[in-house]
Image (tube, rainbow, N blue to C red):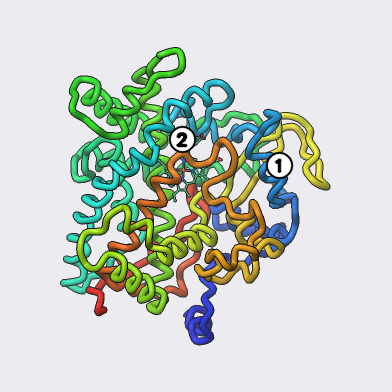
Amino acid sequence: MVEVQDQQDIGVFRPPAPRPRSPLISLLRVIREGEGNLLALVPESAYGQPVGRLGYSRRDILVVNEPELARRVLTNEDGLFPKNDLMVSALDPLVGNSMFVSDGEIWRRQRSMIDPALSVMRVNRAFASMSAAIDDYEKRLDHAAATGKSVSLDQAMSHLTADIICRSVFTTSLESDMARTIFDDFKTFERSVAQVELMRLIFSPAFKAVPQNQAVLDACKRIRTHLGQMVDTHLEGDGFNDIASQLIAARSEQGVPFTRTELIDQLGVFFLAGHETTASVLTWVLFILGTRPDIAARVRAEVLEVAGDGPITINQVQKLRYVRNVFRETLRLYPPITFLPRVAMQKTRLGKLTARRGAMIMVSPWIIHRHRKYWQDPELFDPDRFLPDREAEQTTGAYLPFGVGPRVCAGAGFAQVEGALSIARLVRRFDFTVEHPEAVQPVARLTTRPSRQISAKVSFAST
Ligand code: HEM
């Protein structure tokens, strides 16, 4: 509490982040806490170097911060840095060889068939589903506000974004039993995978497959069965106009559609990549606004000025500049995908360091966004740093919440509209007051999450 309050008094805000230590202390902390929190492994020095080693793991791990080098790794033009083997094997039971993990020609074919399903036109259509999911969630929050109950911000945002993705992909709301089960199983998957992966990262050599634990495999099987049933409903019926129906209609250059298994793989990715990510950033936005009423008031004033108190259209969302900058700045300080892991396929020079074959190469939006050399006062929350007249302060390539190059997030347009609309609607209607903000710390599991649930009182906005 002390830090948050003090910073408020002097008009700047330093949201919580783990205090980085020396490499050895960081490692000991991770092993002791055993929580699958990769952020705790990042030493202080990583925030000032162009390229560094994350010491003390069995496997060589390099962190690449310098924007040009990071671009080289992520664009992977020379084929040296495919997606990391650990991540690929962890995701395999859930999403097979889908576009999130595939490479080369297979990935190119998949991406060209999927991109239209997330085009601007498609996002415009999904806008109605987003608005309907928010309508329903507002009703839940109305109840919390009327009864004075607290809500868990992360659970709330997880529910909202899962509902948005269900409705946009399958025209099914989260209230259906099947959607609910998928959602619960995804939670099991995410929790256990993150925990197992971190220990493998520290103790296993490169390219060594380790069997998944049974609870994860069971959850994946159930998710795939349910996704398969939803795919079948779409294959059998017509009249659907959603993302799933667009994927079913998609054809490769040779005129070949996705098989049923491929459809399940790809739709699994939409749930995996498109739900916890947006939930993560919205949780942090509400945490920040719930500790800084002055910022929330500025957001609300902008929304009322642009859209009044009626329905908000997609054109109005585009005009919410401050809302957009709050969203961007939160993505900078709490990028949902904390680390983008790749593997070096051969011995390679990266800046002043040499990566061995099998080294894990980490490009971390978290570290780059907080790097002392690329950002002014990196740890302060300052949405106005994205105003056009301050663009000169930014280092090219040092802002990458959606990744870089051909593997850049396929759903970035979707997420930006979803994020801005959710913030605008919820903050216009409610005040959120975070309880015990001093206890909130970010951790990196599959996404950047709070270490414990953030509880907030909800009340109807007074202005
Ligand atoms: C704020 C929300 C989101 C963030 C921060 C985010 C971030 C990212 C990042 C960093 C990547 C690249 C991963 C890498 O290079 O290893 C990625 C890939 C991807 N994202 Fe997102 N994402 C978000 C929302 C979404 C949504 C809503 C969808 C779908 C509806 C989506 C679908 C995908 C897909 C399919 C890929 C794989 C692209 C490829 O490899 O070609 N994402 N995302």
Residue 406 horizontal side relative to residue 143, left or right? right
Q: Distance between the Cα atoms at labels 1 and 2?
A: 22 Å
Secondary structure at badge 1 equals loop
Instruction: Check the picture and name the quadrant holding the C terminus.
Output: bottom left
Q: Is mark 1 within 8 Å of ligand 1?
A: no
Please name the residue shown 25% across and 52% down the image: 131
Q: Amino acid at mark 2?
A: Asn
Quarter of the figure with residue 388? bottom right
Place of residue 64 in the rendered image (x, y in percent of width and height, measured from the top left):
70, 48
Task: Please name whichever residue, 140 or 308, is drawn nearer the observer in this view of the structure.
Answer: 308
Query: Tag 2 or tag 1, which sits nearer the N-term?
Result: 1
Q: Is residue 353 left or right of residue 406?
A: right
Q: Amino acid at mark 1?
A: Arg
Number of the label disc, if any, that sits on residue 155: none
- As drawn, which residue projects farthest toward the right? 352
Q: Which residue is mark 2?
A: 213
Label 2: element kind: loop
The residue to which callout 1 is attached is 58
Q: Nearer the viewer, residue 352 or 449?
A: 352
Q: How many marks?
A: 2
Dot 2, how many residues are within 10 Å of its Cα: few (below 14), some (14-19), or many (20+)?
A: few
Q: Is residue 22 left or right of residue 391?
A: right
Q: Residue at 28% across / 28% down in the picture?
A: 245
Residue 50 point in image, percent of width and height: 75, 53
